[in-house]
Image (cartoon, rainbow, N blue to C red):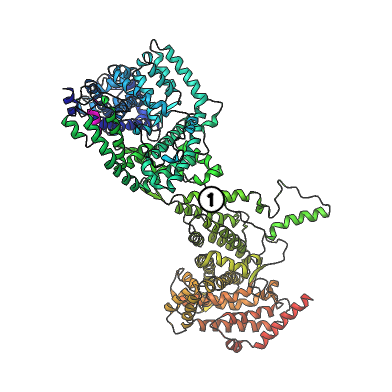
């Protein structure tokens, strides 16, 4: 009857199902606890101040809550009962799941006792393991339930809302409320429940006596036995690794300790009557201070055991044992596990070397691999648990491990080897099953005199059902009487797993997903390992461990995936700290040192300073270069260890991740190298920045010696981003910094005539005035600096710079149009006449500013054409030049502007500036006829205002600089470019209007020659040269046109006079 009952009950299947169900319920309880203790995720009803009275009332009256007599206290629930039902339904149903799980566990445990099942971990491994797992899972659920402080409120509030909505309480509420009250003291109630099951539980636990002590040996005994070594006995290297208890060899130590600690607490009577139970229990108490309940929830085993046994009679000796074990653990366990980790690092390293050299050994020696993974996993998790809760000890360093990266790395390498050579393992065990297991199984079955038909059918499958069926008390084939059959079953089951279930076994022996919940410890381990240079090559193991995190999810708690499993990857330290520093051995850095040396020679006291500065070149001393080189090598090796890995269905490629970090860091470094100070308007010279970037990029290419990354692509991406106003992160770029500086510093002072444009040297120069600027203009605007600027920011950056220059020009043009409007007054007959006394100086000043800006833009465009375009794409430049030369006066203006826009983008000079045309056309506010009149009046007014410039002493023409002191020579560029753009927008003839301007200006300047007052005509000759400059720079005017209205002999005399004055000045 017992045999028939065992078949019908399907004990093995129920154990598997209930264990999975219990794990899901346990995870939900943990999730509820985390949610209720987190202020951000806590249910709003528990945090609402208006509900404080309700919460206190439910906690006081639970579970007997009288809705009729306490309507005033529960009025707030009445107001939002629908919201309460919706918000607390998942919590309530989770507690119902606990109650139902408890009922199913009761039924199964009673059935197992009725069947008089036999438990022995070395005989029927799966059956015994699943039985002990169910007991501990059930106890863990109850303990986890007791840790939820708000369980009464959640259940009681939901039931109140349910009763207010439906007129009666929930059917499950009475039993659920009673269960919550019963487990106020969980271990006391659990001990009562497991009283009838003490015999079965104790039998299963005592079977660990042949496994746990042997597995719990110190590292010294491991080392003496040469554990996990394939080279200890070379003659047996090809022999298959096998034993009578193969599955026990890689069984988790933490799992066994949890079985022993909690199992003997539930069935504590055996601790006083069985010496073997005491030995096993005390050995587990000495192994550590904490065991895992679930996730990062741990149990202080000594505290829990002491509290539970303290209230029981006859356990004084056991309490003394607990104290003794606790003291022993605090003193010794840290060092013991430290030595185990040290041994495992060397053992795994040797194992990997041998297996990489001879992967065929994975077939016979695969058991060693799973043992190594299991042992290492146990030690890693032990350290993590205890590092989060370090006890008061004299050696806290035993609970930290700077070499953890190496152990994690070897674990990942072993798993990778199993995945890579899985076919070797399958092929070997296929032959093993057919040529050994099948034969020995046949011989064993034939030696069994009584082998019923049902058992013989099951023999072919060897599923766990056979183990469970033959473990019942009155089985026809009792497994405990046939130990040889049990050994073959365990061995064959292991071999079949090697055929089709290696991944599941890997998950069982090498799962480190619990690290997901120990964020602080995990990051601390990474930080400690990164500080050790010898460990830096193994740092990639930390991100690779994140691939385990997805294994921690459960289908019964989908909320956890979105709320907690999105664990951020530990980001390795940026490799920039390992690269060589940029050496800035520039002359200006030596100025202070030279000054100090001179003062010392002249015996002058040195100026007081806060801190001494290092001498130039001190940063390039080689004292730390060996360490830096080693660090760089190790970090690059770490990135080369893994091509890619997957975390939560996201593929991470370390080399691409490195490039991303380098890109971000490189952009910041380039910005810092510019030394831009917005307050003092200081910035590095473009040539200095370019030299620094080139040096840095050259040193960055050394990375390619150690790691396969595309540095060229990296540098191109970073420098291309620097040609835009903002980079990919929204931060300002080199283009923005230099655009702001040239506009706010150089051009602003040039507009105020503090800085002069020097056509001879193609730059801007400072005037020798008392209030000298904090920078030398020629150091930022000469040909070399403009070329460096064009190299740095490229065509895109210069386009952005040009757009900002055009904005400033249009603001000046707007003011000029205001003056133009004031200049004309129309009488009844429509005759226009001028009022030259209104804003003469204002017009010329604004035109000069426009000319200065256009002169700077011409310099920048010239540098772009010469450096960037001709150097990098000469063939493209040739085509664009031919296309530009094809444009003539008869070409349609829209086509011409399109060609000019293309040419301007490459830096080629154009007859009509397309950017200026676009800017002028965008500021049209009136009709074309009014705009045309205003433009004509402005040109006329500029012409008639030129004589006023001769009064200004700064209008003197400098032969050395090729221009005037007050930058009025820039009027030539302003008149030509601005008139061409404005008349193009108005669709008028540019050449005709410029010719008219030339005639008016010549006439006015000829009249100036008749003035004999020397004070008023002091710089007349310098002003007359403006006509020659305007004609010389204009593509629409010629010297013949000038000769018609202004004799060349006057220009020749003017040049002679200004040159003569220059000679006198120099003399």
Q: Is residue 24 left or right of residue 1012?
A: left
Q: Is residue 934 above or below residue 332?
A: below
| Residue 856 versus residue 473 in the image, above or below | below
**Residue 951: x and y, percent?**
69, 74
Residue 13 seen in the current view = no
Relative side of 923 to 105, left or right: right
Which quadrant of the structure image shows residue 113? top left
Residue 545's place in the image compared with 38, above or below, is below
Residue at 65%, 80% (x, y): give it: 1025
The one nearer the camera, 598 or 253, is: 253
Residue 448, magenta (yes or no): no
For the view shown, which residue lies furthest in the top direction?
313
Farthest right residue? 603
Residue occupied by mark 1: 575
Instruction: Please state the extent of the stretch shown in magenta in the rendering.
Output: 459-472
Q: In the rendering, at what x and y percent does residue 462 appear? A: 24, 35
368 sits to left or right of 109: right
Q: Nearer the viewer, residue 606 or 1024?
A: 606
Rendered location of residue 296, percent (x, y): 41, 32
The crowding category of the residue bearing disc 1, from other C-alpha atoms within 10 Å (few below 14, some 14 to 19, many at least 20), is: some
Q: Position of residue 286 (x, y in %)?
A: 46, 23
Let me know if residue 226 appears in the view: yes
């Amino acid at each position: 009857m017992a045999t028939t009952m065992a078949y019908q009950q399907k004990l093995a299947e129920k154990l598997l199902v209930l264990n999975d169900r219990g794990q899901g319920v346990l995870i939900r309880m943990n999730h509820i606890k985390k949610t209720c203790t987190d202020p951000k995720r806590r249910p709003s009803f528990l945090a609402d101040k208006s509900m404080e009275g309700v919460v206190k009332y439910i906690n006081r009256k639970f579970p007997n809550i009288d809705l009729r007599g306490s309507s005033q206290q529960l009025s707030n629930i009445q107001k939002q009962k629908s919201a309460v039902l919706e918000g607390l339904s998942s919590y309530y149903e989770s507690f119902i799941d606990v109650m139902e799980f408890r009922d199913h566990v009761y039924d199964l445990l009673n059935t197992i006792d009725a069947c008089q099942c036999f438990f022995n971990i070395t005989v029927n491994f799966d059956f015994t393991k699943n039985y002990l797992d169910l007991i501990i899972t059930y106890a863990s659920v109850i303990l986890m339930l007791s840790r939820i402080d708000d369980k009464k409120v959640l259940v009681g509030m939901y039931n109140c809302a349910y009763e207010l909505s439906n007129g009666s309480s929930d059917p499950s509420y009475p039993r659920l409320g009673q269960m919550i009250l019963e487990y106020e003291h969980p271990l006391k109630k659990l001990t009562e429940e497991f009283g009838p099951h003490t015999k079965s539980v104790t039998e299963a636990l005592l079977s660990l006596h042949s496994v746990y002590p042997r597995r719990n040996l110190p590292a010294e005994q491991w080392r003496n036995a040469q554990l996990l070594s394939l080279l200890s006995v070379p003659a047996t290297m090809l022999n298959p690794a096998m034993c009578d208890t193969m599955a026990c060899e890689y069984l988790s130590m933490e799992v066994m300790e949890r079985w022993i600690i909690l199992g003997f607490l539930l069935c504590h009577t055996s601790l006083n009557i069985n010496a073997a139970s005491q030995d096993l229990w005390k050995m587990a108490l000495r192994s550590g201070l904490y065991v895992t309940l679930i996730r990062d929830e741990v149990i202080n085993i000594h505290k829990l055991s002491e509290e539970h046994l303290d209230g029981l009679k006859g356990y004084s000796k056991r309490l003394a044992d607990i104290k003794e074990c606790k003291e022993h653990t605090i003193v010794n366990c840290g060092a013991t596990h430290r030595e185990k980790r040290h041994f495992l690092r060397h053992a795994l390293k040797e194992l990997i070397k041998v297996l990489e050299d001879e992967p065929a050994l994975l077939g016979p020696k695969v058991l060693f691999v799973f043992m190594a993974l299991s042992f290492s996993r146990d030690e890693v998790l032990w350290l993590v648990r205890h590092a989060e809760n370090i006890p008061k000890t004299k050696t806290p360093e035993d609970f930290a491990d700077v070499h953890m990266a190496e152990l994690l790395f070897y674990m990942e390498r072993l798993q990778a080897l199993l995945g890579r050579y899985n076919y070797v393992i399958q092929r070997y065990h296929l032959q093993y099953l057919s040529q050994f297991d099948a034969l020995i199984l046949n011989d064993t079955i034939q030696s069994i005199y009584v082998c019923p038909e049902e058992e013989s059918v099951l023999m072919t499958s060897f599923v766990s059902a056979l183990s469970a069926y033959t473990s019942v008390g009155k089985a026809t084939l009792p497994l405990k009487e046939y130990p040889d059959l049990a050994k073959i079953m365990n061995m064959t089951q292991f071999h079949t797993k090697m055929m089709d279930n290696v991944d599941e076994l890997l998950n069982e022996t090498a799962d480190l997903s619990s690290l997901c919940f120990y964020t602080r410890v995990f990051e601390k381990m990474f930080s400690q390992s990164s500080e050790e240079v010898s460990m830096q090559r193994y740092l990639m193991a930390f991100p690779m461990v994140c691939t385990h995190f997805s294994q921690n999810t459960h289908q019964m708690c989908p909320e956890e995936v979105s709320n907690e499993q999105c664990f951020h990857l530990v980001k390795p330290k940026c490799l920039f700290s390992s690269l060589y520093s940029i050496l800035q051995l520039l002359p200006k850095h030596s100025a202070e040192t030279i000054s100090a040396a001179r003062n010392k020679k002249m015996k002058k006291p040195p100026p007081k300073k806060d801190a001494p500065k290092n001498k130039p070149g001190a940063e390039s001393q080689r004292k730390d270069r060996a360490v830096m080189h080693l660090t760089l090598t190790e970090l690059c090796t770490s990135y080369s260890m893994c091509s890619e890995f997957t975390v939560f269905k996201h593929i991470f490629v370390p080399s691409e991740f490195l490039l991303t970090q380098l890109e971000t860091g490189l952009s910041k470094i380039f910005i810092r190298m510019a030394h831009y100070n917005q307050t003092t308007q200081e910035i590095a010279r473009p040539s200095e920045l370019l030299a620094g970037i080139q040096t840095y990029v050259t040193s960055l290419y050394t990375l390619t010696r150690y790691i396969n990354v595309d540095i060229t692509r990296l540098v191109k991406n970073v420098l291309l981003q620097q040609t835009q106003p903002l980079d990919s992160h929204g931060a300002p770029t080199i283009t923005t910094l230099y655009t702001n500086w040239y506009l706010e510093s150089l051009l602003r002072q040039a507009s105020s005539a503090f800085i002069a444009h020097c056509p001879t040297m193609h730059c801007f120069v400072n005037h020798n005035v008392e209030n000298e600027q904090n920078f030398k203009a020629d150091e930022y605007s000469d040909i070399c600096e403009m070329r460096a600027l064009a190299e740095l920011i490229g065509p895109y950056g210069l386009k952005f710079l040009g757009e900002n220059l055009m904005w400033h020009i249009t603001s000046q043009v707007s003011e000029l149009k205001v003056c133009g409007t004031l200049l004309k007054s129309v009488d009844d007959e429509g005759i226009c006449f001028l009022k030259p006394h209104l804003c003469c100086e204002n017009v010329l000043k604004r035109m000069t500013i426009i000319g200065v800006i256009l002169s700077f833009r011409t310099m920048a465009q010239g540098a772009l054409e010469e450096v960037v375009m001709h150097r990098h794409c000469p063939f493209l430049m040739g085509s664009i030049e031919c296309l530009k030369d094809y444009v003539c006066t008869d070409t349609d203006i829209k086509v011409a502007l399109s060609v000019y826009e293309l040419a301007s983008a490459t830096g080629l000079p154009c007859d009509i500036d397309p950017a200026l045309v676009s800017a002028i056309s965008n500021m049209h506010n009136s009709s074309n006829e009014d705009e045309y009149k205003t433009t004509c009046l402005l040109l006329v007014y500029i012409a008639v205002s030129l004589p006023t410039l001769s009064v200004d002493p700064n209008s003197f023409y400098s032969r050395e600089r090729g221009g005037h002191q007050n930058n009025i020579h820039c009027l030539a560029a302003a008149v030509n470019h601005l008139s061409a753009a404005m008349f193009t927008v108005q669709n008028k003839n540019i050449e005709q209007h410029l010719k008219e301007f030339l005639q008016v200006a010549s006439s006015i300047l000829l009249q100036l020659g008749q003035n004999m007052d020397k004070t008023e005509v002091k710089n007349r000759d310098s002003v007359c040269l403006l006509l020659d400059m305007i004609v010389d720079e204009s593509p629409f005017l010629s010297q013949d046109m000038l000769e018609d209205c202004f004799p060349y002999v006057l220009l020749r005399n003017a040049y002679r006079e200004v040159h003569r004055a220059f000679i006198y000045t120099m003399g």
